[in-house]
Amino acid sequence: MDADGAITPERYNYPHFDDYIAAGGELADEARFRESFRIGERAPDFTLHRLNTGEQISLSALWTSKPLVMEFGSFT
């Protein structure tokens, strides 16, 4: 993770996933997920890095007159 707590492509934990689970890392992730916004609520604006280019993009740059669907992965 970087200083903001964001996972960077270089630091993604897949190669160390078993150690991450054994250390209880998923418990904190699940707690943050339960505290996140819900269907129908407007998400707070935030900025992420595109994995393919590293370019920063904010959620507000994607808001248009059409609905926006965001997927952040899964717990599987």
Image (cartoon, grey):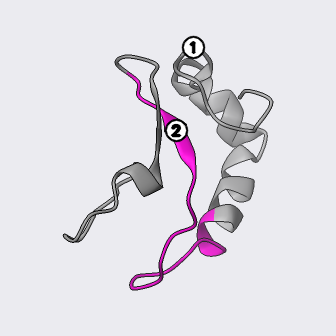
First in residue order: circle 1 vs circle 2: 1
Mark 1 residue type: Glu
**Chain part drawn in magenta:** 33-51
- Crowding around mark 1 (Cα neighbors within 10 Å: few <14, some 14 to 19, many 20+) is few
Q: Is mark 2 on a helix, strand or loop?
A: strand
Q: Distance between the residues labelled 1 and 2?
A: 15 Å
Q: In which quarter of the image is the N terminus?
A: top right
x then y, percent, for residue 4 = 76, 37
Please tell me whether residue 29 is drawn above or below residue 52 in the rendered image. below
Please tell me whether residue 17 is drawn above or below residue 48 in the rendered image. above
Question: Which one is in front, 26 or 35?
Answer: 35
**Is residue 39 located in the magenta-colored stretch of the structure?**
yes
At a point 35% along the width and 55% down the height, the residue shown is: 71
Residue wearing tag 1: 10
Which circle marks residue 48 in the picture? 2
Q: In this view, does 75 lie to the left or right of 26?
A: left
